[in-house]
Structures are given as C-alpha cells and as structure tokens.
Image: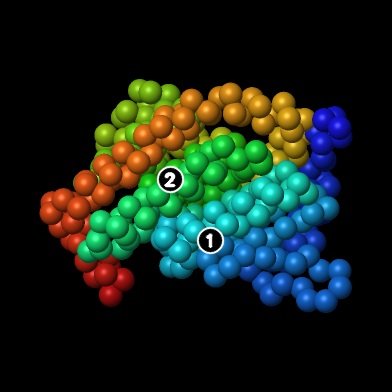
Amino acid sequence: MALATGMRVPARALLRAWARLPGAALGRTEPAACGGGGVRRFGNQRVLVEPDPAAGIAVMKFKNPPVNSLSLEFLTEFVISLEKLENDKTFRGVILTSDSPGVFSAGLDLREMCGRNPAHYAEYWKAVQEMWLRLYMSNLVLIAAINGASPAGGCLMSLTCDYRVLADNPRYAIGLNETLLGIVAPFWFKDTLVNTIGHRAAERALQLGLLFPPAEALQVGIVDKVVPEDQVQSTVLSVMAKWMAIPDHARQLTKNMMRKPTVDRLVKQRDDDIKNFVSFVSRDSIQKSLQIYLEKLKQKKG
C-alpha cells in the first residue's frame, strides 16, 4: 500500500491534469464548468480551491483583494478549506498561489491589530497561529507558487511550504519585514526562517526587515527556485511530481521529525504567546505606529 501511494507521478501527467482545471493558469480565475464532466471548484469568498482528484492535487488561490491580506475572515476560510483537503485522502499535494498576480499576500491585516479591543486581538492572533500550525505540519505536499510580492505574513505562509517557486520579477520581493513597521516578529516566525535560511542570515534579515528581490531570495535560500513568470506553472508541477514520487508515509514521518520540535515550542507556549501579542499590540506606541502606517497607505491609495 505504501508503494502504491508513493508511486511516481510524471510531470506530464500533472500538466495534463492542470490543463483540465478551469482557469488553469496561475493567478487567473474563470467561471467553473457546470454540468457533467467538469471539475467542480469549492471554497468561499476569499479562498478558491481548484481540485483535480485524478491527479491528486489541488490549487488554493488567495482572493482577498486588493493585496490578499490575512484578515480574520481569510484565515478562517483558509483553514477550513485546507482541512477539507487534508481529510479527503484523494489529495496528496496542494499548490498555494494568488488569484491576483502582482501580490502573493501582503501579510497580516493591520486593521485587525489597530483600534480594536483585547478580545479581538486575542481571537485574531489565535487564528494566525492556527494557520501556521496547520500549514507547517500538514501531511500534504505543499508548494508555493509565488506570483507576486510576499512580505511579512505572506512570506511566513510560503516558508511553511515544502518548496517555493518565485516568479522572476523585481517587484516580487519576499521577506519578514516586521521591524520596518516597529513590530517584532514572533519567535515562531523567527524559528521558521532560521530553519529555512540559517541563523546568521535570519538574524540579519529580521533585524533589518529585509525584503529580498528574486535573485537575492534564491541566493539566501528563502525560495528554492526562481523562474520566468510564464514558467511558474510548469515548474511547480514538475516539482510536485518529484515530491509525490516519494512514498507518503516515509515523507510525512520525515517532515514530522524535522518540524515537530519547532511546532512543539509554540504549542507549549500558545496561550502565553497570545497574551504577549495582545499586550504588545495594545501599547499606545504600537497603536500610534500602526495608525500612522495605515494613514500613509490610505494617502497612497488616494
């Protein structure tokens, strides 16, 4: 049985399967087919899921315009959709991407962290934790098809994946830039980055709030591959085929072995982490910084 679930899936087969999906190109949504024979999408207002049971993969597209910010509603809908895929043994791999080329995800929704009450801050942070826990320990093969800018929480989402492919566009920078906003990245953000690029590179990136353009992101190891935008789809599917060729049980146990110590650290301190976040974000100085930044964003849009 283990050999059967881990049998090799040729990239060409996945490409054919992808072509059957409605709106198959990354970051492009078309009306789903109705009637017999069509692949039925599911999802909700902010997350679109395009499943292909025959290939055993699904594409999860972020569609929370204008910048796919991680609002409480988005996080809730995302976790529900991911859980649905994990509970369906048909699916072995998931591709995370944006429905709006140009931005993968701008990260945490600062409006959830500004001008609200402590109970809301606690609810929001618990949802952010849940998103990370679900992704980082998912048994599915997760590949990020990064087709836009990916700062802060957007970067965190991609770091939870098993592999990251970034479109080669100088505007598509990626990194944990929290310090630029006067915010400190939580220890589990830090741990995820350290696990990916090493301690010294992570220390420098976090202190300076660095956002890496594609070439530098590849060099430091925050992404695994940089390709022209029109090759992201084929590259992701080729990579997915290699990962799905590995017997699931062996890959999943190895992933668990590598990542569980990092996850356990948050699980043991989850309540304290929420309290620390609420205390930090409730400070007058932090609220003022967030208000100034949000006002600048409004002026920029205007």
According to the picture, the residue beneath numbered tag 1 turns out to be 77
Query: Could you tell whether 137 is left or right of 25 in the image?
Result: left
Secondary structure state at the residue bearing disc 2: helix
| Residue at position x 32%, y 28% in the image | 203
Within 10 Å of disc 1 (Cα), the crowding (few <14, some 14-19, many 20+) is some
Say if 301 sits above or below 187 in the image. Answer: below
| Residue at position x 67%, y 52% in the image | 85
Query: Could you tell whether 235 is left or right of 149 in the image?
Result: right
* Residue nearest the observer in this picture, 68 or 205: 68
In the picture, the quarter occupied by the N terminus is top right
Name which quarter of the figure residue 155 lies in.
top left
* Residue nearest the observer in this picture, 167 or 164: 164
* Residue nearest the observer in this picture, 1 or 53: 1
Say if 173 sits above or below 198 in the image. Answer: below
Give x and y (percent) for residue 123: 37, 55
Can residue 95 be seen from the camera position used here?
yes
Which numbered disc, 2 or 1, marks the residue that appears first in the sequence? 1
Name which quarter of the figure residue 275 lies in.
top left
Mark identifier at residue 129:
2
Secondary structure state at the residue bearing disc 1: helix
| Residue at position x 23%, y 50% in the image | 281
Query: Could you tell whether 4 is left or right of 268 in the image?
Result: right
Amino acid carrying mark 1 in the image: Glu
Query: Could you tell whether 25 is left or right of 181 in the image?
Result: right
| Residue at mark 2 to residue at mark 1: CA–CA distance | 14 Å
| Residue at position x 67%, y 31% in the image | 252
Amino acid carrying mark 2 in the image: Gln
